[in-house]
């Protein structure tokens, strides 16, 4: 930590200038990097302490810091304040290349493009003490790592040096493709499945095909890449037939290196696990088996990790209030820190959900059996009991380690039907004792939610139903029921309670955090809104409520879709962190994931922290510093992004395969993206994304107007803008790559101008020649 300026209590301390503050931030960053210890987070509090700023002067300091941020002189991130364009002391980085001397070069995994090119970092190997067994693997090109960085003074080269703290993922060296046999040569060709791959096809000789058969998904290595002809390749591994079930998700699993086969020791540990008892290892659980907790999940759910119950609160300090109980499967009892199950769960980070399969974080013996809150069966749980008032405000909460027995397994639709007056045999006995109290408690919770005003984006999620052979049956948007919202709201309340309890107990934890939008993104939003007549001052600090006001202004109008899309793109990405900076989207000061330890490692960490902090028996969090938790948080955040990319790509490939038989068909959609190269169009029925090259739009030249998110004709003024409803024709489908190409059938805004341009373009060449003369 930099030395604080010495101030005398007897004299007035001059208020720091912008230059003083910038110098202090730079000095703090340099001393933190030189020290090599835990990074010092610099925020308003540290600056106020360093310059002796107290009382009302802190308001002036806050305004000065905001000015520096708007001017682009400083940047605010989860790591605190640092000079704009400068990096915090610990950075998640991607190692992308080597320099002429063979040194590894990296860039930050996340970087604001508005700040210019991402800085380059020369990577140094991790330190190893002679008396330790700790081993950090040597990094290589394509790896992702946590680096402790320090600025370099040399110009013209990398701006930073970075020492590896932890290697998070190994590079995927292989290229995936589909083998197509050539009967003449007995070899074949490889059709790459990644649409970003430079070599779309490669040639394989008979000697290099291995056991690959026509239509197989294979991994290959490139043997040569000459200037003439297709590159040569060798099949390294046969991964399965593309004609079999689950082939599409297999591509994503292998492309992203998602572990889908459990290690033998992990399976052995899962099979050896014994059901939890009321008393074990010197601790006795509370007996909650008569409490009618129920699970409410999708109809096809195989694991049930949360159960709920609500009842009136009889306490005199909460008239007409409620007690809401959320019970979560006690995964921490079975998955102990450092054991085989734990090591593999950390490697996976989370379960990955594809339309045709699930790649679970934990073996089925744990996730679908011992930790699944099955109807009528005893199961261990960690329960949060919350008292809420009629206004939804949470009065207090407490955690219990219990043995429970689910009274019923219901689907969302089943529970909703019962409340709407259509109970069935399963829900009729539960209507008065369980369902109606839950809905009354939810009505109260909604009051508090509306007052809190979290970000309210209308983003429908599509579901893909498959036939028995693994092909697409239909794609639809499931209805958004009050039953969904009820479970979501009670889970949020429990997650907040977990974070509050651990903070009160002075326990380290992993938060689920969501940063506020950057100044650059807010300025871009303001520029766009100005084009449709909505004023938003640049540099203004926005809360979710103000975003909701913007969305409300355009609801039902022609700009509704484009504004929803741009507001979404303005938001930062949520992540796991050990240093809390709040959850902007939910408008919460503290938030942790507690409710899904079967499928998220972050929740397991929070369970263990609660067990230890509240002395609830075995399976608690071991001694673990905040820096160690920060490394785990970065790793599972990367695993989450990996899973999201794999799920998205699998959906794209399934839909492209589904539409490949409809070449020439026309579809309604909306423009979902605008670039200089063309338009991305999302189809209304299926949610499929395809591309319309700018060169195919018409006889005009279309320039990219970034502020408007539009392509505009240079002569006609015809405009294709983000969010516009359009009609397109499918002209090409590449199922393995998940790529679609469309032809635009709709006129843009200003279609009369386009019609005139097309009319001129279709005139006979001789006539056009005479006119030019």
Image (spheres, grey):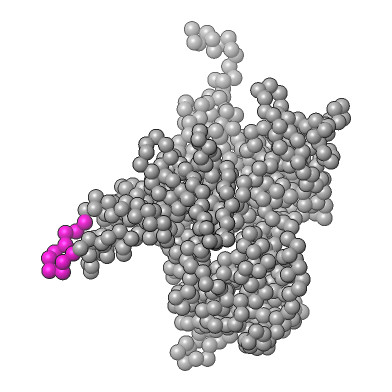
Question: Which sits in the foreground, 235 or 551?
Answer: 235
Count of number-bearing discs: 0
Question: In percent of the image, x 60 and y 35: which residue is there?
Answer: 692
**Can residue 587 be spotted in the picture?**
no
Q: Quadrant of residue 334?
A: bottom right
Q: Is residue 241 visible to the viewer in this orientation of the structure?
A: yes
Is residue 554 inside the magenta stretch? Answer: no
Residue 73 percent location from the top left of the image: 32, 48
Question: Is 532 or 256 nearer to us in this picture?
Answer: 256
Q: In this view, which residue lies farthest toward the left?
A: 11
Query: Image check: 409 left or right of 51?
Result: right
Residue 218 position in % (x across, y down): 76, 42
Location of residue 601 in the rendering, given as x and y in whole percent from the top left corner: 60, 65
Q: Between residue 307 and residue 682, name the one nearer to us.
A: 307
Q: In this picture, which residue range is highlighted in magenta?
A: 7-16
Q: Quadrant of the N terminus?
A: bottom left
């Amino acid at each position: 930590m930099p030395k604080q300026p010495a101030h005398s209590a007897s004299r007035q301390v001059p208020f720091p200038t912008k230059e003083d503050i910038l110098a202090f931030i730079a000095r703090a960053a340099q001393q933190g990097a030189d020290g090599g210890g835990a990074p010092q987070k610099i925020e308003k509090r540290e600056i106020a302490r360093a310059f002796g700023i107290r009382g009302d002067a802190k308001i002036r300091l806050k305004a000065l810091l905001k000015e520096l941020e708007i001017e682009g002189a400083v940047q605010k991130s989860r790591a605190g304040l640092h000079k704009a364009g400068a990096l915090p002391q610990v950075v998640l980085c991607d190692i992308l290349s080597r320099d002429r001397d063979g040194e590894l070069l990296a860039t930050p995994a996340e970087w604001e493009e508005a700040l210019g090119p991402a800085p380059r970092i020369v990577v140094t190997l991790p330190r190893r003490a002679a008396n330790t067994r700790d081993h950090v693997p040597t990094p290589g090109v394509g790896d992702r790592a946590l680096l402790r960085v320090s600025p370099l003074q040399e110009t013209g080269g990398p701006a930073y040096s970075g020492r590896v703290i932890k290697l998070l993922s190994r590079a995927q060296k292989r290229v995936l493709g589909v083998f197509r046999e050539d009967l003449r040569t007995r070899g074949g060709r490889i059709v790459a499945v990644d649409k970003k791959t430079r070599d779309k096809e490669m040639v394989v000789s008979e000697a290099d095909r291995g056991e690959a058969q026509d239509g197989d998904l294979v991994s290959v290595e490139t043997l040569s890449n000459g200037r003439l002809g297709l590159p040569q390749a060798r099949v390294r591994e046969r991964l399965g037939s593309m004609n079999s079930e689950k082939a599409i998700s297999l591509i994503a699993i292998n492309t992203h290196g998602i572990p889908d086969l459990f290690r033998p020791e992990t399976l052995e540990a899962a099979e050896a696990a014994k059901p939890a008892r009321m008393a074990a290892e010197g601790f006795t659980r509370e007996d909650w088996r008569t409490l009618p907790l129920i699970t409410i999940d999708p109809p096809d759910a195989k694991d049930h990790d949360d159960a709920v119950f609500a009842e009136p609160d009889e306490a005199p300090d909460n008239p007409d209030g409620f007690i809401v109980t959320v019970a979560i499967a006690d995964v921490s009892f079975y998955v102990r820190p450092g054991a085989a199950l734990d090591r593999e769960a950390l490697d996976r980070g989370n379960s990955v959900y594809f339309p045709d399969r699930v790649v679970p974080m934990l073996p089925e013996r744990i996730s679908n059996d011992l930790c699944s809150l099955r109807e009528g069966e005893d199961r261990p749980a960690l329960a949060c009991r919350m008292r809420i008032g009629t206004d939804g405000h949470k009065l207090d909460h407490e955690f219990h380690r219990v043995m429970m027995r689910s009274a019923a397994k219901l689907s969302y639709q089943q529970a909703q039907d019962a409340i709407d007056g259509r109970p069935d045999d399963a829900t009729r006995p539960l209507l008065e004792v369980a369902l109606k109290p839950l809905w009354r408690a939810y009505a109260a919770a909604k009051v508090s939610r509306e007052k809190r005003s979290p970000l309210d984006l209308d983003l429908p999620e599509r579901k893909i139903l498959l036939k028995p052979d693994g092909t697409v049956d239909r794609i639809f948007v499931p209805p958004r029921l009050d039953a969904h919202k009820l479970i979501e709201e009670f889970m949020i309340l429990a997650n907040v309670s977990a974070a509050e309890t651990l903070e009160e107990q002075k326990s380290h934890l992993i938060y689920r955090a969501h940063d506020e939008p950057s100044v650059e993104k807010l300025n871009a939003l303001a520029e766009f809104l100005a084009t449709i007549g909505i004023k938003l001052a640049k540099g203004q600090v926005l809360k979710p409520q103000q975003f909701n006001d913007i969305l409300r202004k355009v609801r039902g109008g022609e700009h509704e879709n484009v504004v929803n899309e741009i507001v979404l793109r303005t938001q930062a990405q949520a992540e796991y962190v050990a240093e809390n900076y709040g959850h902007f989207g939910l408008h919460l000061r503290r938030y942790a994931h507690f409710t899904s330890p079967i499928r998220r490692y972050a929740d397991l960490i929070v369970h263990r922290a609660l067990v230890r902090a509240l002395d609830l028996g075995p399976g608690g969090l071991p001694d673990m510093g905040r820096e160690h938790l920060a490394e785990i948080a970065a790793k599972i955040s990367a695993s989450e992004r990996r899973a999201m990319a794999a799920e998205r790509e699998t959906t794209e490939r399934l839909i492209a395969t589904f539409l490949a038989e409809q070449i020439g068909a026309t579809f309604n959609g909306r423009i979902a993206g605008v670039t200089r190269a063309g338009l991305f169009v999302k189809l209304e029925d299926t949610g499929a994304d395809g591309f319309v090259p700018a060169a195919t739009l018409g006889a005009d030249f279309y320039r990219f107007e970034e502020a408007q998110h539009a392509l505009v004709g240079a002569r006609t003024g015809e405009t294709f803008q983000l969010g516009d409803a359009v009609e397109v024709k499918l002209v090409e489908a590449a199922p393995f790559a998940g790529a679609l190409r469309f032809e635009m059938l709709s006129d843009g805004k200003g279609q009369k101008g386009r019609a005139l341009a097309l009319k001129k373009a279709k005139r006979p060449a001789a006539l056009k020649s005479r006119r030019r003369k």
